[in-house]
Image (cartoon, rainbow, N blue to C red):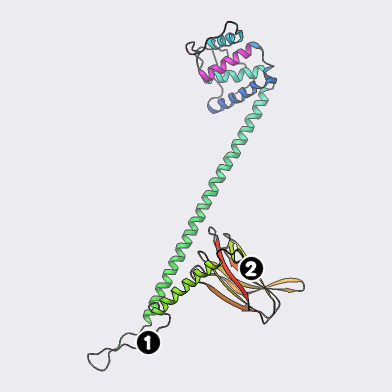
Amino acid sequence: MSTNGAAAAPGNPQAPEVTGDILDLHYEFAIHYFKLAENRAQIDYDATSTLMALHKQATKGKFNAAVEPALGWFDFVGHDRRAAWEELGDMTKAEAKFEFVSLIGNSCEGFASWLEHKVMEHREKERKLEEERQERIRVAQEQERLRQLEEQRARLEEEQRRLAAAQANMHAHQHTPDRVMPSTPGQYASPQRTIPNSPMTPNTATTVQQKAAELEQFRQDLRDKSDYTLQIGRGEVVRVRVPNKQPGKTMVLWKFCTEANDIGFGVDFEVTTEGEPVVENIVPVERKPCDTELLIGSHSYPKPGNWLLLFDNSFSILRSKTVYYKCELM
């Protein structure tokens, strides 16, 4: 649309060069421009009356004396504007908007460049909003993809645990001797054999229950003690530094578990050589089922330095972990 082209005559409007949302946008900007006092000063009385009439036509449609309030005898401005509105006849709202924008362009020299600038600002704002919307969609899709990967990983791990348990059970049955036929007819004998820690023995069930109770008691004892609790974010590795006070004589003893899910654990030892810290791996990082059992370990080192207890959650892309731990020097 040419904002400084000749306006069509009110009684015979030309077809708008722009329609729909673009025309509405130009019209809104033109209304804003017209309301500024310094711009209205450039528009003469007749053009102002026409603009007010076009605004009425664009918002209300054709003039209808039955629904419009009566004007006072001395409201000369109101009568002029109403007369201009009546002259517009059956002009459509879209045509009225177009004529309004065109008349502003004809009356105000700076309107065309101002409108172009405002339209560019509007498009840039819309572009940024669309980019933000697309970024939100992308982030949501990526989070959903990671969630599905984490669920798939959890399912695979559970399947591996079930398979390992089934294999262990099969192995136990394979190593249990069958009953043998004794030499005395009519009698059977079964060898008397005790299998320690067999899943079927009462002692083992009691031990499992004791371990579970010990694990839960350990959690309860430390749950409200911030010094013994670590919040490890997803993808994060946390190091706990423990000084070796008496090399060769001091032993570090650690106990830990998680509130839920497993975590990687390892031990490094840090020494200072020629003023530079050197780290030696003692226990390689390995994922531990510390959500189902209390893990306990110890280590002694002959050199001065620091043990570094590593709690590794870098493999988890969705879940944070809560770790309860105790570390003692003996």
Around disc 1, counting alpha carbons within 10 Å, would you say few (fewer than 14), some (14 to 19), or many (20 or more)?
few
- Please give the name of the residue rendered at 59% of the width and 13% of the height, measured from the top-left corner: 50
Residue nearest the observer in this picture, 215 or 128: 215
Q: Which secondary structure type mostly characterizes the magenta part of the structure?
A: helix
Of pointers 2 and 1, the one earlier in the residue sequence: 1
Residue nearest the observer in this picture, 82 or 100: 82
Instruction: Specify whether residue 224 is in view.
Output: yes
- Please give the name of the residue rendered at 56% of the width and 65% of the height, measured from the top-left corner: 323
According to the image, label 1 marks what residue? 193
* 146 in the magenta segment: no
Q: Secondary structure at mark 2?
A: strand
Q: Position of residue 209 (x, y in %)?
A: 44, 73
Q: Is residue 246 left or right of residue 135?
A: right
Up-down: is 310 above or below 245? above
Quarter holding the N terminus is top right
- What amino acid is at disc 1? Arg
- What amino acid is at disc 2? Val
- Seen from this angle, which residue lies furthest right? 274
Q: Position of residue 47 (x, y in %)?
A: 63, 13
According to the image, label 2 marks what residue? 240
Corner quadrant of residue 128: top right
Corner quadrant of residue 321: bottom right
Up-down: is 178 above or below 215? below
